[in-house]
Image (spheres, coloured by chain):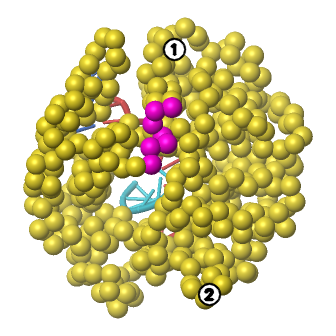
Chain colours: A yellow, B red, C cyan, D blue
DNA sequence: TGGCAGCGCAC
DNA sequence: GTGCGC
DNA sequence: GCCA
């Protein structure tokens, strides 16, 4: 985070601004600057993040269930008889968005909610104004849901939906990687009723190549990956990456980098001081070939080897991998792995972006936005908008480390393990 | 009442 | 252009 | 579903 990724310092590319030039060109002392201590990417410093114990799993598990139901409803125009909206302008999309936030807040709440007094205490914390900062994100409907779960152990709304076999089946299909609500609804309409069913008549299901992989590896891909295994996977990739391109930097991001005890997938970012065009032309395809040949990378889901507009900016390979059997002969699980290669000039931005968490990123982007800036996995630039259309994007500030990016924004640096905020 | 990010790849 | 995942 |  604070130390450069390579020993030799990088020369600033001509099209980047120095920190001085950048700060000179950005507005300061705006109203957001005075309130920046309230940001999720600043205010939770030292309080959230390292929370490893989930005191309110009895509540969040139920909210998660309802969330996945809404997620199915949100994106299933085929399921709704009247046809849902085509975009995420759909009402359910934002219910899910909002509930995710609530789950994050409860996961980080340092004590279990059992009694009405516990709940009132938390509500009071949310309503307090003046001296204490006012917390946001839980509204009246959600307080009612939490109270219902505390009293009855469940939500009537969940049972109503799950009693509908269409919803229950669609939720199961949605667990297949590459199958969203639209496909799940299509499969229901075609008469499929279970994963087993789908496997039996896979040819009739008309799945895409990715969905077929998702179905074949279904059970394994549902499992969390222990931290220890993420490290093993990283070391295999590092070994082959180093063979392909000596001196390559290999950094595993995602929840692993935030210190999580287990992860949903493995997100590996790589870079090298060499010339960008050269790095982005052959390295990743070469690495992928090596990983395939050794049997480690078993499936490729999608590539971004860069034939599009942004071919100079990054390359990706999403796939499935598996470690060799353990010494006592036990087979290992198939795991989702993302490989990404960024040129050195944007490596710090990419590392910051893919380390997350989601809400931490949103918070930083929001702050940047209010200062007339735009933050992405490629840079931090001045943005000019007319009628909400981005018409012009300035040069990015030069950053060799994540800390440089915080500095450019005028924020305090936050270590990865404290970026675990969700609220 | 409008905003909550926006993008690239498979098909 | 839609669906999907990031 | 929450918020300004």
Outermost right residue: A8
- Residue A83's place in the image compared with A208, above or below, is above
Point 11% across, 68% down: residue: A163
Residue A409 percent coordinates (x, y): 61, 23
Which of discs 2 and 1 lies nearer the camera? The answer is 2
Q: Secondary structure at mark 1?
A: helix
Identify the residue at horizontal 51%, vertical 30% (top origin). Answer: A45
Compared with A268, A368 (above or below) is above
Provide the residue designation for mark 2.
A328
Q: Is residue A47 magenta?
A: yes
Q: Position of residue A189 (x, y in %)?
A: 22, 75
Q: Main secondary structure of the magenta part?
A: loop
Q: Vertical placement of A72 versus A397: above or below? A: below
Residue B2 placement (x, y as % from top left): 30, 28
Q: Which mark is residue A408?
A: none
Q: Which label is found at residue A33? A: 1
């Amino acid at each position: 985070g604070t130390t450069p990724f390579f020993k030799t310092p990088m020369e600033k590319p001509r099209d980047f601004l120095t920190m001085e030039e950048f700060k000179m060109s950005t507005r300061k002392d705006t109203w957001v600057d005075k309130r920046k201590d309230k940001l999720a990417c600043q205010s939770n410093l030292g309080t959230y993040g390292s929370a490893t114990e989930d005191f309110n799993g009895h509540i969040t598990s139920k909210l998660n269930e309802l969330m996945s139901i809404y997620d199915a409803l949100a994106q299933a125009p085929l399921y709704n008889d009247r046809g849902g909206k085509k975009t995420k302008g759909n009402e359910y999309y934002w219910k899910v968005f909002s509930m995710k936030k609530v789950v994050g807040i409860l996961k980080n709440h340092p004590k279990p909610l059992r009694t009405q007094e516990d709940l009132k205490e938390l509500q009071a914390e949310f309503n307090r104004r003046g001296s204490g900062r006012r917390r946001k994100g839980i509204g009246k409907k959600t307080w009612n849901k939490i109270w219902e779960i505390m009293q009855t152990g469940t939500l009537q709304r969940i049972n109503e939906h799950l009693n509908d076999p269409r919803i229950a089946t669609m939720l199961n299909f949605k667990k297949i990687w590459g199958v969203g609500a639209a496909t799940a609804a299509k499969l229901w309409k075609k008469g499929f009723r279970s994963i087993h069913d789908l496997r039996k008549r896979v040819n009739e299901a008309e799945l895409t190549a990715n969905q077929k992989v998702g179905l074949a590896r279904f059970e394994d891909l549902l499992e969390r990956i222990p931290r220890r295994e993420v490290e093993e996977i990283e070391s295999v990739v590092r070994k082959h990456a180093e063979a392909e391109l000596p001196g390559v930097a290999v950094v595993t991001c995602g929840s692993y980098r935030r210190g999580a005890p287990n992860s949903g997938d493995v997100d590996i970012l790589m870079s090298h001081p060499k010339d960008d065009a050269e790095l982005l032309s052959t390295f990743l395809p070469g690495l992928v070939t090596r990983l395939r040949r050794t049997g480690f990378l078993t499936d490729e889901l999608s590539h971004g080897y860069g034939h599009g507009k942004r071919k100079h900016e990054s390359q990706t390979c999403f796939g499935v991998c598996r470690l060799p059997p353990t010494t006592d002969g036990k087979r290992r699980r198939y795991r989702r792995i993302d490989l990404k290669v960024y040129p050195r000039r944007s490596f710090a931005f990419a590392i910051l972006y893919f380390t997350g968490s989601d809400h931490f990123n949103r918070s930083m982007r929001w702050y940047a936005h209010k200062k007339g800036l735009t933050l992405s996995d490629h840079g931090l630039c001045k943005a000019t908008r007319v009628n909400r259309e981005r018409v012009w994007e300035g040069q990015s500030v030069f950053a060799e480390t994540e800390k440089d990016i915080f500095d450019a924004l005028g924020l305090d640096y936050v270590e990865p393990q404290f970026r675990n905020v969700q609220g």
